[in-house]
Image (spheres, helix red, strand yellow):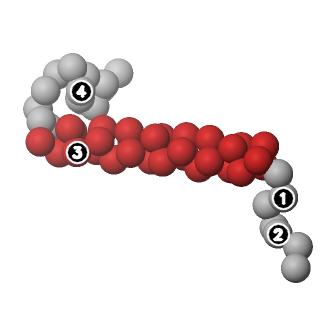
């Protein structure tokens, strides 16, 4: 029976890429949460009401 992930380098690379993906996903949802709780903050919604 052959293992799918044969070397330690492959496992390390998979964990780094997977961990990086979860960091990006978590930062996206954290940003959505901040804009939900502070919708009228001009630092967050500065470009929302521009009418050029």
Q: In the rendered view, would you say 46 is above or below 48?
A: above
Q: Is residue 17 left or right of residue 1?
A: left
Q: Which residue is mark 4?
A: 44
Q: CA distance from mark 2 to mark 4?
A: 48 Å
> Which residue, given by chain and number where applicable, does mark 2 sit on?
3
N-terminal of the pair, mark 2 or mark 4, is 2
Question: Disc 3 marks which residue?
Answer: 33
For the residues labelled 4 and 1, say whether their Cβ atoms are less than 8 Å apart. Answer: no
In this view, the mark in front (2 or 3): 2
* Residue 17 in sight from this viewpoint: no
Q: Which residue is mark 1?
A: 6
Structural crowding at the residue carrying mark 2, measured as other residues with C-alpha within 10 Å and reported as few (<14), some (14–19) or many (≥20): few
Left or right of 20, for residue 13: right
Contact flag, marks 1 and 2 (Cβ < 8 Å): yes
Distance CA(mark 1)–CA(mark 2) = 6 Å
Quadrant including the C terminus: top left
Q: Residue at x 62, y 41 (%)?
A: 16
Is the Cβ of the residue at disc 2 closer than 8 Å to that at disc 4?
no
Name the element at disc 3.
helix
Disc nearest the viewer among 1 and 3: 1
Residue 50 falls in image quadrant? top left
Residue 1 percent across, percent down from the top left: 88, 79
């Amino acid at each position: 029976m052959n293992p799918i992930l044969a070397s330690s380098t492959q496992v390390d690379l998979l964990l780094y890429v997977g961990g990086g993906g979860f960091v990006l996903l978590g930062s996206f949802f954290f940003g959505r949460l901040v804009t939900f709780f502070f919708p009228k903050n001009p630092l967050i919604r500065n470009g929302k009401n521009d009418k050029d």
